[in-house]
Amino acid sequence: MLVFTTTHLQATSPSALCSRCGTPGSRVHSRYVRTIADVAFGGRCLVLKLRVRKWICRETSCSQHIFAERFPELVQRYARMTDRLVKALQALGVTTNGTDAARIASSLSMPTTAKTIIRRVLQLPLPSEGEVAKVGIDEWAWKKGQRYGTILVDLEKRRVVQLLAERSVETSTAWLRTHPEIDLVSRDRGKIFREAATDGAPQANQVVDRFHLQKNFAEALEKFFRKQEPALKKAIPGSTGKTRPTEGTAVPEKVAQERQARHRQQVKLHKRIWKLYRQGCHKAQIAQLVGVSSSKVYRTLEQETPPSPRRRSHSSSIVDPYLLQ
């Protein structure tokens, strides 16, 4: 249970400076009270009731006829939190995340929400990019399947260097040209980042990132073993010491033809999706042009080689004698 402590504050200075012209106010026009949250005190939620005076500016040429006194070392204009509470929430948000930081702050008698934490973190200035020798470039999703940006990472320092608002050759090339010290670019196999690295950093070596390197290796192994499938099937009985099971009932000719037709359609669809992807189309656009779901496009782009025909093992069934041949 949260316990609140309220403290009343007011300025004691005889006058205040006009926020526009800097002239001391002549007399007090009115007063109002600001409610401000502060860091916890003694395990209690601390709330400040700050009494603010409004002054009349004595400078007749000043457009700010009435102004309120400011407290720049305590709280900013229109703010509902003190500067020290904002810094504490920002430190928690940077160290953890919005949800965890809000939970920790609430346990420390500084109740807040995850959205507030994130909003305060976004107010922090971005660190300078500095020199980047080895950079990794990839896409990131504003909204998956619809809108994408570009992320650039310093591979030596293991930190995000820049987030670009869109995924395009022009924006990526422009950023790479501002860093002529880059000597290595790690990227995926897409056309966009390949052209951007070639035009924006011609002096750099281009390598495939770890994820796509493992993916290429897995696809190469799969392609190799598919070609060796007959030899592997022959080797299985000898390695296990068991006799090879007898073949089941032959697949009807009509069913076999339907399977071949479906496989040709799958290969045709696979080639079309990859052709559009190499032309620079977004995955959501490909799904609309081809007439399939976005998840289907993602699964297809995971494997560059067309799918091979599936060989289904036909197990014996009590209805086998009644199948039409």
Image (tube, rainbow, N blue to C red):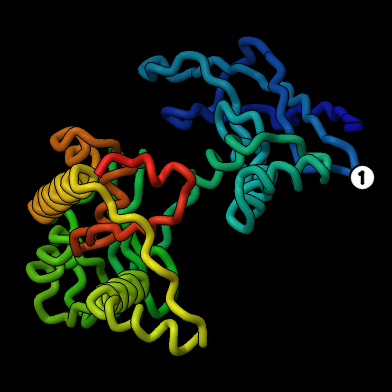
In-image side of 304 versus 100 (left or right)? left
Residue 143, position in %: x, y?
A: 36, 38
- Within 10 angstroms of label 1, few (less than 14), some, or many (20 or more) residues? few
In this picture, residue 272 sits left or right of residue 299: left
Q: Position of residue 45 (x, y in %)?
A: 84, 35
The percent position of residue 317, horizontal first and vertical second, equals 47, 48
- Tell me residue 130's x, y (percent): 33, 71
Residue 192 visible somewhere in the drawing:
yes
- Quarter holding the N terminus is top right
Q: Is residue 220 left or right of residue 117?
A: left
Q: Is residue 49 above or below residue 222?
A: above
For the residue pair 207 and 29, the one nearer the viewer reads as 207
Q: How many marks on residues?
A: 1
- Mark 1: which amino acid? Gly
Q: Residue at x 29, y 36 (%)?
A: 293
Q: Residue furthest top?
A: 30
At x 24%, y 39%, the residue is 284
| Residue 236, picture quadrant | bottom left
**For mark 1, what is the residue?**
42
Residue 170 shows in this picture: no
286 w.r.t. 185: above or below? above
Q: Nearer the viewer, residue 11 or 168?
A: 168
Residue drawn at x 22%, y 77% as measured from the top left: 227
Residue toward you, 54 or 281: 281
Q: Nearer the viewer, residue 250 or 282?
A: 250
Image quadrant holding the C terminus, namely top left
Query: Picture quarter containing residue 157?
Result: bottom left
